[in-house]
Image (cartoon, rainbow, N blue to C red):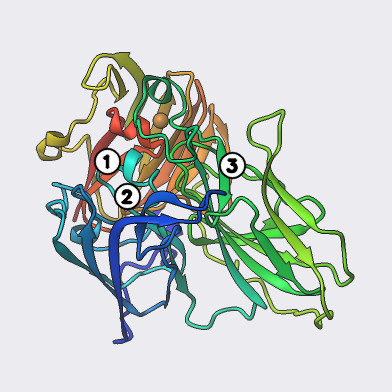
Amino acid sequence: MVQELGDALPHQAHPSGRVRSFDLVAAEAELPVAGQEHLRVWAYNGQVPGPTLRVRLGDTVRVNFTNRLPQETTIHWHGVRVPNGMDGVPHLTQPPVQPGEHFVYEFTPKDAGTFWFHPHVRSSEQVERGLYGVLVVEDESPPPYSQDVVWVLDDWMLDETGQIFPQFNTPHDLAHDGRWGNTITVNGRTDGVLVARPGERIRLRLVNSANGRVFKPDLGALSAEVVAVDGLYARAPFPYAGFELAPGNRLDLDIQIPSASIVPVMVVDRFYPPLPHALATVRVEGEPVAPASFPSPAHASVPRWKEGLALPVTKQFRLNARRGGPLGLEWTINDQAFAGHDHDAPPALTLSRDRFAHLQFTNESFRLHPIHIHGMFFRLLARNGAAVDEPFFRDTVLVHAKETVDIGVVPEDVGRWMMHCHILEHAEAGMMTTVAVVP
Ligand SMILES: [Cu+2]
């Protein structure tokens, strides 16, 4: 298994020596977002989404962070294999950053791809209020797409005054799949438009930053190939035929715009039938460009781990809920609900670096649980016992109601990592634990 992994996930970063410094300030703001003229949000650098930080593989990222929020916070770099101390988990990897305080995040990404960042403190409130941004780590020689576009998908629960509904972790949200809003946005807009010329070849990076909503984008008449999932390139490009983009997931698409003008394409979400929700419009207009023929960047070495499923389960995790706890309902992993002070508790699981582990998640509930593990990428081995060979790694996998999911992982990065449901209300209500990786 380890041999099959090879160097698909590099052990070490290879710093080029170039340092890219960014100042990032989290503060309250009033912005034209979600169809409102003056939405009161919490924002990074006065923007929702926050700034897209774009670096090259080999660059060292230095983020001078200032907290001007009325609450403590941290920044977690979702999917980035950072040194454990830079992972942004309060009490586990750093003290929370208090109002008025600063913290410097510094790391050299080991992988090129689409990542994002968001608070890991009271995240069901802080992310919902608008705190998230995208980190793009470009390849050393980026493929020559005519456009490289980021779409951050989110939804907002607005009240009758057109402001963010101010109660968080409501009994309804907790008992269901988290907070599903009444206003869907792409990059903060309800009327987003991507303008392309005929013949263009576009890289579209999708990020789901919603608290609970799963998106299944339908590109209509546009044809696309998937080139990367959760930041990492696939073994080979494959035709896009819908993908369940759960909270936390990313998807990179290679879109070939037709060489003739077409009517505008409405991209819609079809996860929750029967009603498709509008996401954004792709408008093709202007002078055609010569078709770009370059090889797809998706040619990663991704292990198959065919024998993995037959190996004994290293650890089973049962996902369920019960009454009780500070919010009235607790979401549990193996009957344990995580509370703030549990960061000091022994990890739920200790894995050895460079050793294969077979993990199994059994959803005993009727709700969705996109399980995210920090600090490592894993491969899906099976759903409900049936072998699956996804040609890509993940850092987040959606476990549906009453479903059992098997994954394989060879951790490469030592530390104490969180494992939690990325429905942020479920995480706040206890569906979190820690996994230690030791040398
Ligand atoms: Cu969940």
Q: Residues within 10 Å of mark 2 (few under 14, many from 20)?
A: many
Q: Nearer the viewer, mark 1 or mark 2?
A: 1
Q: Is residue 228 left or right of residue 276?
A: left
**Dot 3 corresponds to which residue?**
215
Residue 161, horizontal then vertical, whole percent: 47, 36
Tell me which corner region of the image, top left, top right, bottom left or bottom right, holds residue 258: bottom right
The C terminus: image quadrant? bottom left
Q: Is residue 164 above or below residue 336?
A: below
- How far across and how far down the image is residue 293, in percent? 75, 79
Which residue does the numbered mark 1 point to in the structure image?
Answer: 122
37 relative position to 67: left or right? right
| Mark closer to the chain start, 3 or 2 | 3
Q: Is residue 166 visible?
A: yes
Mark 3 in CB contact with mark 1 (< 8 angstroms): no
Choose top left, top right, bottom left or bottom right for residue 197.
bottom right
- Quadrant of ligand 1 in image: top left
Q: Label 3 neighbourhood size at 10 Å, few (<14), some (14-19), many (20+)? A: many
Tell me the amino acid under the disc marked 2: His
Instruction: Tell whether circle 1 marks a residue whose Cβ is less than 8 angstroms from ligand 1.
Output: no
